[in-house]
Image (cartoon, grey):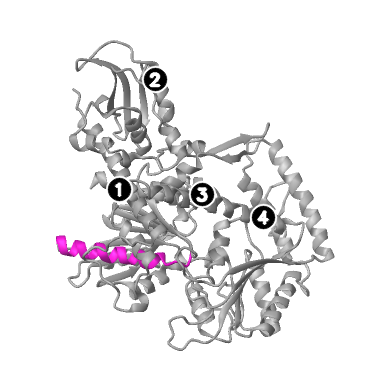
Amino acid sequence: MTIMVSDKAQALLESLPILEPLTQATKNTLKPFALNRRDYLEIDLDSRGDRFVIEACVYQDGIRTDRTPSYNAATKWVSKVPEAYQPKGWPYGRWLMAGTDFTAIVIAHQWPSDRLKFKTPEARTLYEFLLMRFLVQTKNAVLAADFKKNEVVPEAPQDFIEHPDPDLRLSPYQKAGTFISYNTNAYAFFMQQGTGKTPMAIERMCMEGRRKRREKGEMLWVLVLCPKQARTNWEDEIERFATSGGKVAVARGDQFRRIKAIQDAVRPEDDCDFGCCIASYESIDRSWNAFGMVPWDLAIMDESHYIKWHGTKRFQMACRLREISEKRLILTGTPVTNTPFDLWSQWEFLNNGLSGFMVFKNFRKFYGKFERNQGSSIERLMALRNLPLIQERLARTSFSITKEEAKLNLPPKTYDAYEVSMTEKQRKYYKMLVKQLAIEIEEDEAEGKELTAEHILTKLMRLAQITSGFVKWDNKIDPNTGETIELGQIEQIDKAENAKASALMEILNVDYENDPNSKTLVWATFIEDVRAICERLTKEGIKFVAYHKVVKGDGRVKDAEEAKKVFNGDPDVRVFVGNPASAGEALNMVGYDYESDNPAPTYAGRVVYFSQNWSAVQRSQSEDRAHRRGTRGNVQITDLVVPGTIDQEIRERVVMKRKIADMTLDVRDILDRVLNVDLEAQD
C-alpha cells in the first residue's frame, strides 16, 4: 500500500520560500541531481519509528515495476544526506536515514513531490512534521532579522500584559525575542550576559500560565533548572518581573525537602496562573524519581551550556526531562564554550534531532576535520567546516543579541595583562615540575594509557599553582604495599611575599588613589589562592567579602548571594574574592545597590584574574558579572601573568576559544539573507 503526499504537504513543498536555503553552503548541499522521469522514492519508517527507510524504484502507469532505478536515484543523491546508511544485505537503492529535518529537506529538494510514495501514514506524518517545523523556524528567523535590521518588533499577542512598573518593562529587543518564542514549543535565548534573558523567560512563563488558565482552567507547571548559585536569583527575579499571579518553590536540602518543594509548586491554587519549581542540576539528578513524575508544561534550562557534553549523566537527565515536558526553553550567553560541537546536546534537549543529526559523532564529523598523530590516541581538531550550516540553524532556532546590538550603552570593557615575576624559589619549583610532567606523560604513553587533551591540560594546571605561589605535594606512597602513608601537603612557596598577591595590592592601591569609589572583583581558580588573597587583604586593612570556607574573619559570608548583597550594598567593601566555577554566573556585581532609591556612588570598575583555568565559559561569565545593565563606568579586565609560563598559554587558549565561539554565533550575514525570503505565499 502506498500513500501519496497530502494536499497540505504538497502545497508546502511547492512553496519554494519555505525551503529556500539561506547560505551558499546550503544551496550547494541541496542542489538536486538529474533523475529519470520514472524514478520514484518510497518512504517508510524502521521498527523504532524515528528513522526513514528509503528505497528508490521505478513506477510506470502508477504501478511499481522490477526495473532498476537510475544511479542518481539509487545512490548519488544519498551523498547529500549526512546520516544515511545501507545495512548489510539491503538491496540496491534502499537506505536507512535519520528522521531529521536535514533528511526531509534534502529529500524535498532532490525529489519532486509527485515522485514520493509513502508506505505508511506514520512515515508521511513524520516527513510533513519535519518540514512544517522548518517552516516555523524560517518565519522565526525572518522576524528576528526584521528586528535586528529594521528594529521592527513582532506584533504583541492580544493577551500580552506590560509590567505595571515602567522600569521593569521589557525593552524592544526583549519583546522581540519573547514574542518569537511563542511560535514554537522549543526555542533558545542565546543572548550575551547582561542583556536580560531571565525576564524574557519569566514573561513567557506568565503568558503560558494565563493561556492555560483561560483555556483549561488549570495552573501551568513550570520547572526551572539552573546552577545551584542561581536559584535565589531566579526566585527574586520572578517576584520582580512576573506579570501574572503565581507561586515559586525552591528545591533545596535533603530528599524530603526537595519532594515537598515539587508538591508545593504543582498543588493547584485558584489565584495562581503558574506554579514554578526552581531546582539545581545536581538536585534534579539526585531526585529524578520525584521530578520525573510531573508532566511539566514548560521546562526552562538556564545556563544550558551545563549540558554541552553529551556523554554525561547530566545530559541523559536532560533528555529524560525533554520527554516529559510539553515545551522547552534554554538560556545561555555562552552556548559555544570550546567548539560548535557544544551545540549538539543543547539542540537535542530542545527536540530530538533538532541539530539535524541524531548521533553526536556524525554531527562532529560533518562539522570538523580531525587528524591523529601517528602512535597517539589523541584526535586533534584541525579545522571547522560547513560552519554556515550551523549559523543558519542558529538563526532558525534561537534569538541572539549582543550588548552592542541591544543598545545598552554600557561603558566599554578594556583588557590588559599585569606582568608578575616569580621568585627564585618559584622558578626552581616550576622547572622541576615541567620535567616531572614530561616524564609522567611519556610513561603513560609507554604503558598504553589513553591520553586525552583534557587529561594533559589538567596535569598542566599544576604549573599554574606554582605561578600563583603555592605547590601541592603528591601523597607519599609505600612502594611495597601501594598504600598512602602520608597525604600531600600544600606549601606556600614564599609565604612572606606572594608575588601575585603583591601585584594585586599595587593595583588596588593605585585604583583607590585614582577613584575611591571604584571596586574590584578578584577571580581565582584555586581555593588556596582565595585563602592567600583574603589573608593579604586583611593584613593590608582592605575591606573585602568572600564566602569560601578557607576565608577567616569579618570578610566571610555564608554564600555567593550574600556576598553579592554585601559587595553591592556596603560602600566600604572594596573587593569581592571568588572562584569563577562557583560564583561566576547569575550574580549582578555592579558595586552598588541597583535596587535602592538612593544608591551609593560606588561601582565595580576592575576585574582581576589572579589565576584561571582552561574554561572559556567560566572566563566569559565571570567577566560580565560587573559588565551588565547598571554598570556605571568602564570595566578594566586585568590578568596577572608570569610571561613565558602556563599563565600565558591559558590566556591565549581561552582567547582562541572565545574567537571560535564568536565566529560561530555571528549570524548577521545570514539574517541579511533571511530578509530576502518572501513568505507571502504562505499566508
Q: Can you identify the residue that label 3 sits on? A: 664
The location of residue 107, given as percent across then percent down, is: 34, 30
Residue drawn at (42%, 47%), measured in percent from left and top?
673
Mark 1 or mark 3: name the one nearer the start of the chain: 1
Circles 2 and 4, Cβ within 8 Å, touching? The answer is no
Residue 471 showing in the rendered view = no
Q: Nearer the viewer, residue 18 or 653?
A: 18
Amino acid type of the residue that numbered disc 1 sits on in the rendered structure: Val
* Residue at the right extreme, as displayed: 424
Q: What separation in Å lies between label 2 and label 3 (alpha carbons)?
A: 34 Å
Which one is in front in this view, the residue at disc 3 or the one at disc 4? 3
Circles 1 and 3, Cβ within 8 Å, touching? The answer is no
Magenta stretch contains residue 198? yes
Report the span colored magenta. 193-216
Residue 127 showing in the rendered view = yes
Instruction: Kindly identify which numbered label has been placed on residue 72.
Output: 2
Q: Can you identify the residue that label 1 sits on? A: 136
Of the 4 image quadrants, the one containing the N terminus is top left
Amino acid type of the residue that numbered disc 3 sits on in the rendered structure: Thr
Q: What separation in Å lies between label 2 and label 4 (alpha carbons)?
A: 48 Å
Question: Which secondary structure, mark 2?
Answer: helix
Mark 3 or mark 4: name the one nearer the start of the chain: 4
Amino acid type of the residue that numbered disc 4 sits on in the rendered structure: Glu
